[in-house]
Amino acid sequence: MGEAMATTTIQPSVHQLLQELADLSRKALTGLENLSHLHEEDIQFGTTPKDEIYREDKVVLYRYRPLVETPFPIPLLISYALVNRPYMVDLQEDRSLVRNLLKLGIDVYIIDWGYPGPTERWLTLEDYIDGYIDSCVDTIRARHGLEQINLLGICQGGVFSLCYAATHPEKIKNLITMVAPVDFHVKSTGGCGLLNSWCQSMDPDLMVEAFGNVPGDFMNFGYLMLRPFQLNVGKYLSMLDVMENEAKLLNFLRMEKWIFDSPDQAGEAWRRFIKEFYQKNALVKGEFVLGERTVDLKTVTMPVLNLYAEEDHLVPPASSIALEQYVGTSDYSVKGFPAGHIGMYVSGKVQRDLPPTIAEWLIARA
């Protein structure tokens, strides 16, 4: 009787295990077949048509072709981070921040920072902010016959945009920051953030002395190590769940290609960014000097929309939310989205809500 009961108890679990192994094998075989059909040209980014408007050194300003007959008259310039490629905002047609903004009538420009090489080793933060960004802003202003344009800064590009708006307020009508760190020493439930802790303990002088330009692979490896299991093991285990579906597999491969497409960082600019922002927290202390001017966030008096990711592991939400207490504007809006840092670009739910939030906010301040 006892042996019979034991046999009855064991048999279903063995059967379940065999079934799971069979399902896993089937998924793997189907996935391999799907992979065999794909080519490099299938894993494309930036599907929204755009035109080169201005070029300086390796930096290129693009304008996306409007998708409505009469776009909103004040264009929006997107300033992305240096550490990754900006096509994340136009990753694929059905999850493209850019395409969704265009559909809502926003006239969109974007800065492509390019791939710094040995000749960019000595580029400074002044070169990026007072140089390239200012040239792009002036180019757009001249093309449209405007005194001011709208500016959207994402992540590190948000820091650049804050500095630019503080020192060139006469050229910016509305400022939007997205997953942008502001208080780099903020304390929250999860501490000051893994990335902040990592950067605060770096020796940037030694890094630049050793490498010149800081290798993109080094920075990327550091980001992956912030969540070692999830970003190095877990995602590849979960890949089996999407390999059967060719569309989902393509999405996965696009993300992988973007993650590992990490430009090197211009040595001098990177050194100072780490020191001034991550280590000294100079932006919120009012101690960051750009050229001969101290960046005072109180001079950011234009309307500000601050967007953050509620589950961000790279930029703690509290670091972004802190912006309100430092800017001088009386028209300040803040909104969080249920996503992580990357989810702000690829989450279907976020892409349903984020573009209308931006477009409606801008149009209301025309």
Image (spheres, rainbow, N blue to C red):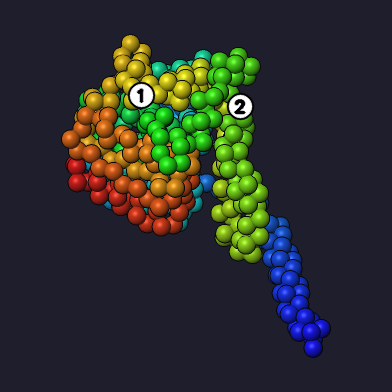
Where is residue 220 drawn, in percent x and y? 59, 35
Seen from the viewer's position, the closer of residues 177 and 230 is: 230
The structure residue drawn at horizontal position 33% and vertical position 29%, both measured from the top left corner, is: 162
Where is residue 53 drawn, in percent x and y? 39, 32
- What residue type is disc 2 on? Pro
The structure residue drawn at horizontal position 51% and vertical position 19%, both measured from the top left corner, is: 271
State the SS at label 1: helix
Q: Is residue 288 left or right of residue 70?
A: right
Query: Which residue is label 1 attached to?
Result: 283
Where is residue 169 drawn, in percent x and y? 24, 26
Does residue 144 appear in the picture of this structure?
A: no
| Disc on the earlier residue, 1 or 2 | 2
Is residue 20 depicted above or below 298 in this figure? below
Query: Which residue is label 2 attached to?
Result: 215
Q: Is residue 139 left or right of residue 204?
A: left
State the SS at label 2: loop
Where is residue 363 drawn, in percent x and y? 22, 46
Seen from the viewer's position, the closer of residues 135 and 262 is: 262
Is residue 108 depicted above or below 337 in this figure? above
In the image as oriented, which residue stretches furthest toward the right? 3
Mark 1 Cα-neighbour bin, 10 Å: few <14, some 14–19, many ≥20 = many
